[in-house]
Image (cartoon, rainbow, N blue to C red):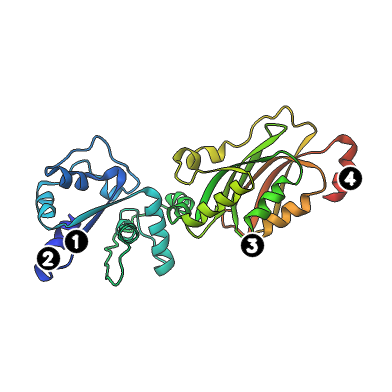
Amino acid sequence: GLISGIASYVKRVRPEIRIIGVEPVDSAAMAQSLEAGRRVKLDDVGLFADGVAVKQVGKETFRICRELVDEMVRVDTDAICAAIKDAFEDTRSILEPAGALSIAGVKAYCERHRTRDKTYVAIACGANMNFDRLRFVAERAELGEEREAVLAVTIPERPGSFREFCALLGKRSITEFNYRYADARIAHIFVGIEVANRHETAELLRAMHKRRIEAYDLSDNEMAKLHIRHLVGGHAPDAEHEILFRFEFPERPGALMQFLNSMSRGWNISLFHYRNHGADYGRVLVGMQVPASDKAEFRAFL
């Protein structure tokens, strides 16, 4: 309804202006209908952008769009979350997912066509945002704007490996670090890293592979982002003399590396869970293997 009304007015006043529609990839009823040349009815639709969650477009809107809409763009949920963040950072206003669709579409269109010296107008509408949903938006926005890389990495299982791996990352901020002891030779870790773009992620992977570190990019893996990041852990029978501690430290750049450096006293870390939530304090759950004979020394160290 919105695009058919705006297209009718704009094309009457300035017919040379291109009208580009945007839909979520899981609710692309208009895009599929325009491609098919008839109204297509979807079996189901995604509900994140509920304002455009339509199984079948109306007859009159389809007739107008078929005549006046020049192109359609489809974006995923992460891109919509990134667009909500863009609008908030520019205006301190919070758009609902359907209202941020056009911003996500402009970004996707410009990236795809590499256009220059053009003027784009995004119709940003709707602020019907559920407060609880903001938690999900904040979680996925960094991935949507390709500012966070989610990696699965294998490193040697020995004291100091964490610190060496973090040193390889340089000054990049670590947004998440999950690990659980499972094997006496190798350690599997799930790590989130702040990056500038996908190109930097590729460079980082190449640097790891040069060091013969096995690493995989899970940034586009829905199962990893929704589930696996919360499942790193569990019972480890071989982690002898394990004790669990929860640490808090002021959250600032380099704080996690400083924490790891301070913990490098020879005791093996058997569990590590850290996630940067943007709070003032960083909170880490750590399992360490401390034999009974070392307990007094360990308490003094703490």
Residue 162 is situated, as x and y percent measured from the top left of the image, at 70, 47
Seen in the picture, residue 43 relative to 138 is either above or below; the reply is above
Tell me which amino acid carries mark 2. Lys
Q: Nearer the viewer, mark 4 or mark 1?
A: 1
Q: The disc labelled 4 sits on which kind of residue?
A: Glu
- Mark 2 touching mark 4, by CB under 8 A? no
Give the amino acid at mark 1. Ile
Q: Quadrant of the N terminus?
A: bottom left
How far is mark 3 from mark 4, CA to CA? 30 Å
List the residue tagged with mark 2: 11
68 lies left or right of 55:
left
Packing grade of label 2 (10 A; few <14, some 14-19, many >=20) is some
| Residue contact at pointers 2 and 1, CB within 8 angstroms | yes
Could you tell which of marks 2 and 4 lies nearer the N-terminus? 2
Residue at image point 9% right, 67% down? 12
- The disc label shown at residue 253, or none: 3
Where residue 302 is drawn, which disc sits there? none
Q: Identify which residue is drawn at 11% across, 62% down.
A: 8
Q: Which numbered disc flags the more N-terminal residue, 3 or 4?
A: 3
Q: Earlier in the sequence, mark 4 or mark 1?
A: 1
State the image coordinates of residue 163 (x, y, percent, origin top left): 71, 50
For mark 4, does the 10 Å Cα neighbourhood hold few (<14), some (14 to 19), or many (20 or more) residues?
A: few
The tag earlier along the polypeptide, 3 or 1, is: 1
Residue at mark 1: 19
